[in-house]
């Protein structure tokens, strides 16, 4: 910001111009810091909101997954039960057929 007009330099003098430049630079720095703080706060708030949504979705998916696992286990138990029943019935038929053949 050292491009100060001749008229301003004549009015303020070199020391005044330097002080004005320092004041403007400090003001810019303060504004940047304030803007950065505001942006950080908004980002943190938005991040918290989105993380809350992700956590909620994960909890819902966990519940759904647990339900699917429980359902699959129940289906497996039924499958094992029916397979065992079919094998048992075949053995009974075989025993009965073998028993009738010996009579």
Image (cartoon, rainbow, N blue to C red):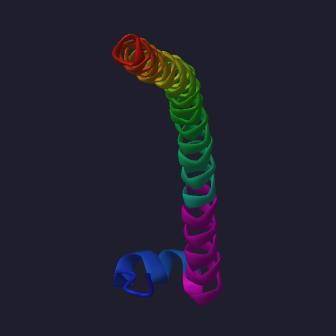
Query: Compared with residue 54, is residue 100 higher up or lower down, i.e. above or below?
Result: above
Residue ranking furthest to the front: 103
- Residue 24 shown in magenta: yes
Q: Overall secondary structure of the magenta stretch?
A: helix
Query: Compared with residue 62, is residue 12 higher up or lower down, i.e. above or below?
Result: below
Q: Residue at x 43, y 24 (%)?
A: 87
Image spot of residue 51 (x, y percent): 57, 36
| Magenta segment | 13-31
Query: Compared with residue 43, is residue 97 higher up or lower down, i.e. above or below?
Result: above
Image spot of residue 43 (x, y percent): 54, 43
The quadrant the C terminus occupies is: top left
Image spot of residue 58 (x, y percent): 54, 31
Residue nearer the viewer, 36 or 81? 81
Q: Where is residue 96, by image quadrant?
A: top left
The quadrant the N terminus occupies is: bottom left
- Residue 27 shown in magenta: yes
Query: Compared with residue 6, is residue 97 higher up or lower down, i.e. above or below?
Result: above
Q: Residue at x 50, y 27 (%)?
A: 65
Residue nearer the viewer, 82 or 45? 82
Image spot of residue 9 (x, y percent): 47, 82
Residue nearer the viewer, 93 or 56? 93
Q: Residue at x 51, y 17 (%)?
A: 81
């Amino acid at each position: 910001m050292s491009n100060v007009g001749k008229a301003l330099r004549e009015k303020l003098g070199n020391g005044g111009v330097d002080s004005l430049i320092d004041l403007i630079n400090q003001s810019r720095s303060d504004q940047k810091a304030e803007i950065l703080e505001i942006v950080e706060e908004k980002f943190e708030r938005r991040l918290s909101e989105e993380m809350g949504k992700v956590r909620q979705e994960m909890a819902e998916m966990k519940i759904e997954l647990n339900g699917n696992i429980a359902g699959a286990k129940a289906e497996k138990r039924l499958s094992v039960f029916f397979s065992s029943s079919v094998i048992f019935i075949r053995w009974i038929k075989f025993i009965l057929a073998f028993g009738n053949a010996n009579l």
